[in-house]
Image: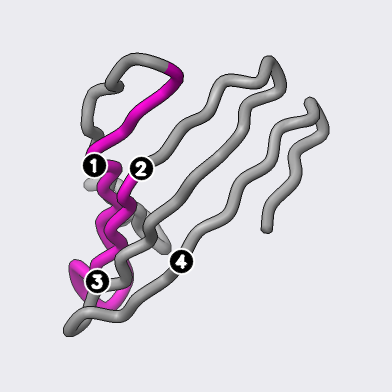
Amino acid sequence: MLFDSDGGYGEGHWTRVDQAWIIKSTAVMPDGDTGSATIVIEPAGPDKFTLKGLDRILGDGTQPDFEATIVRKPPQAAQ
């Protein structure tokens, strides 16, 4: 269970599938709207992973999917 300082809260059920983690999450926003999403966290190398948000619903509408790559340490700048 997760609580935020604005009064919202949420929870997620984590399942490991091969090398990825799949999180089925639900939430209640501070204004009372509900939301849900599927989050996929998957390794993309020794120092990075991808984070995907799929099937996102907020209130009565859908939200666009997203994908982000998280890197432990950025590469050195070329000199």
Please name the amino acid that badge 3 sits on.
Pro
Can you tell which of label 1 and label 4 is closer to the viewer? Answer: 4
Identify residue for label 2. 37
Identify residue for label 3. 43
Residue at coordinates 79% horizontally, 30% vertically from top-left? 7
Q: Earlier in the sequence, mark 2 or mark 1?
A: 2
Identify residue for label 1. 54
Residue at coordinates 38% horizontally, 61% vertically from top-left? 23
Please name the amino acid that badge 4 sits on.
His
Q: Relative to 6, is 77 on the left or the right?
A: left
Q: Is residue 33 above or below residue 44?
A: above
- Count the marks: how many? 4
Asked if the residue at tag 2 contacts the one at tag 3, i.e. Cβ–Cβ closer than 8 Å, the answer is no
Q: Give how far across and how far down residue 21 sits, in percent.
A: 32, 71
Identify residue for label 4. 13
Please tell me how crowded label 4 is: few (under 14), some (14-19), or many (20+) other residues with Cα within 10 Å.
few
Q: Earlier in the sequence, mark 2 or mark 4?
A: 4
Residues drawn in magenta = 37-59
For label 2, the SS is strand
Please tell me how crowded label 3 is: few (under 14), some (14-19), or many (20+) other residues with Cα within 10 Å.
some
Asked if the residue at tag 1 contacts the one at tag 2, i.e. Cβ–Cβ closer than 8 Å, the answer is yes
Residue at coordinates 28% horizontally, 21% vertically from top-left? 62
Name of the residue lying farthest toward the bottom = 18
Asked if the residue at tag 4 contacts the one at tag 2, i.e. Cβ–Cβ closer than 8 Å, the answer is no
Q: Earlier in the sequence, mark 1 or mark 4?
A: 4
Q: Relative to 75, is 60 on the left or the right?
A: right
Could you give the CA–CA distance between mark 2 and mark 1, rounded to whole angstroms?
6 Å
Can you tell which of label 3 and label 2 is closer to the viewer? Answer: 2
